[in-house]
Image: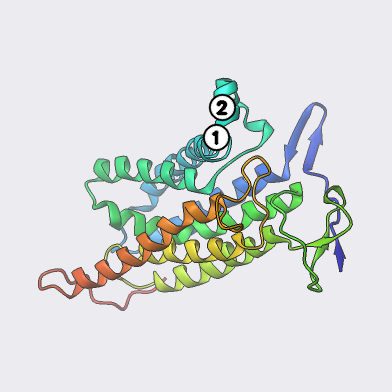
Amino acid sequence: MLTYPAIDPVAIAVGPVAVHWYGLMYAIGFVSGWWLGRRRAHQPWRPVTPVQMEDLVLYVAIGVVIGGRIGYMLFYGWQRLADNPLSLFMIWQGGMSFHGGLLGVTLVLIWYARRLGRPLLELVDFVAPLVPIGLGAGRLGNFINGELWGTRTDLPWGMVYPPLGPHPRHPSMLYECLLEGVVLFIVVYLFSRRPRPIGSVAGLFLLGYGLARFLVEFVRLPDDHIGYLAFGWLTMGHALTIPMIVGGATLTALAYHWYRLPGHRDQEAGATD
C-alpha cells in the first residue's frame, strides 16, 4: 500500500505570483506538441510547413482552453453555470474537460483547414499524434492536485489519499497518464510515421483514447454532484467516450475503404520521421 506524497500544487512562488504545476503541465503539452509538430512538418508530404506550425499551435491552444472550459461547465457543471454564468470564466477554481477541448480543437482545425485550403482530415491526422503528450502531462497535473481519484482497491499499488479516508484507492489519474499519454502516443506516433489513408490516424487516435478512457472509468470515482448515470457503473465519462470509440472505429474503417478505391491512393509508403 502506498500513501499519496502530498505534493505542493504550487511549483514556483515569487511574492504574490504563483505558478502551479497544473499550468506547467499544460505548457509542457503545448511546447512538446510544437516541437514535435515542427519536426514532422519538415516532411514534404505533411499538410503544414514549420512556419505554419507556429500559428497552428497557437490556435490549438486557444481551442483547448476555451473548449475545455466550456465543455466542463456544460457536461459537469451545468447547475453551477446556471446559478452563476460568470463561473464560466473562473478558471482558477478548476474544471477542464477533454471532450470539450476536443470539440474546441475540432472547430479551430475546421477553420484553419479552410484557410490553408487543405482537407480537414489531413490536418487532423497531422495533429493527432501531437496530443497524447499533453494528455499525459495533464494527468500528472491531476495527480499533483490530488484529484480524479479512483475507487477502493486491495491491489499493492493502491494509494491512500487522506482527505478521502484511510482506504487505498486506484490512482486512476496515473492509469490515464500511462494509457492516454504514453501508450497512446507510442501507438499513434509510430502508426503516423509513414503516409496512411487520410483519416486513419485521426480514427486510431479517437479509438485508442476512447478505449483507454472507457476502461479507466470503471475504477474512477464519478463527480459527487453527478454520480453514476445508470446501471450502477455508467459515468459521464463513459457516456462521452462511447461516441469516440464508435466514431474512431468507423473513421478508420472508412479511411481504408476509401484508400482501396481507384484514384484514392495516397503517396507510396516509405517516408519516416
Q: In the displayed structure, does residue 18 sit left or right of residue 252? A: right
Q: In the displayed structure, does residue 255 sit left or right of residue 217? A: left
Q: Tell me which corner region of the image, top left, top right, bottom left or bottom right, holds residue 173.
A: bottom right
User: What's the CA distance linking mark 1 and mark 2?
Assistant: 6 Å
Residue visible at 63% across and 66% down? 178
Q: Secondary structure at mark 2?
A: helix
Decide which of tag 1 and tag 2 comes sooner along the chain. 1
- As rendered, which of 252 and 23 lies closer to the eye? 252
Say which residue label 2 marks: 81
- As rendered, which of 13 and 88 lies closer to the eye? 88
Tell me where residue 19 appears, x and y as whole percent: 73, 38
Question: Of the numbered discs in the image, which one, if any, rests on residue 144?
Answer: none
User: How packed is label 1: few (under 14 Cα within 10 Å), some, or many (20 or more)?
Assistant: many
Tell me where residue 142 appears, x and y as whole percent: 69, 50
- Check the image and tell me how it is coloured: rainbow
Considering only vertical position in the picture, is 256 above or below 128? below
Tell me where residue 155 appears, x and y as whole percent: 78, 73
Q: Which kind of residue does numbered mark 1 sit on?
A: Met
Q: Secondary structure at mark 1?
A: helix
Residue visible at 44% across and 56% down? 37
User: How packed is label 2: few (under 14 Cα within 10 Å), some, or many (20 or more)?
Assistant: some
Considering only vertical position in the picture, is 262 above or below 46? below
Q: Which kind of residue does numbered mark 2 sit on?
A: Leu
Q: In the displayed structure, does residue 66 sit left or right of residue 43? A: right
Residue visible at 81% across and 32% down? 14
The N terminus: image quadrant: bottom right
Q: In this view of the protein, can residue 35 be seen by the observer? A: no
Question: Of the numbered discs in the image, which one, if any, rests on residue 73?
Answer: 1
Residue visible at 25% across and 72% down? 256
Q: Tell me which corner region of the image, top left, top right, bottom left or bottom right, holds residue 224.
A: top right
Q: In this view of the protein, can residue 51 be seen by the observer? A: yes
Q: Are marks 1 and 2 in contact (CB under 8 Å)?
A: yes
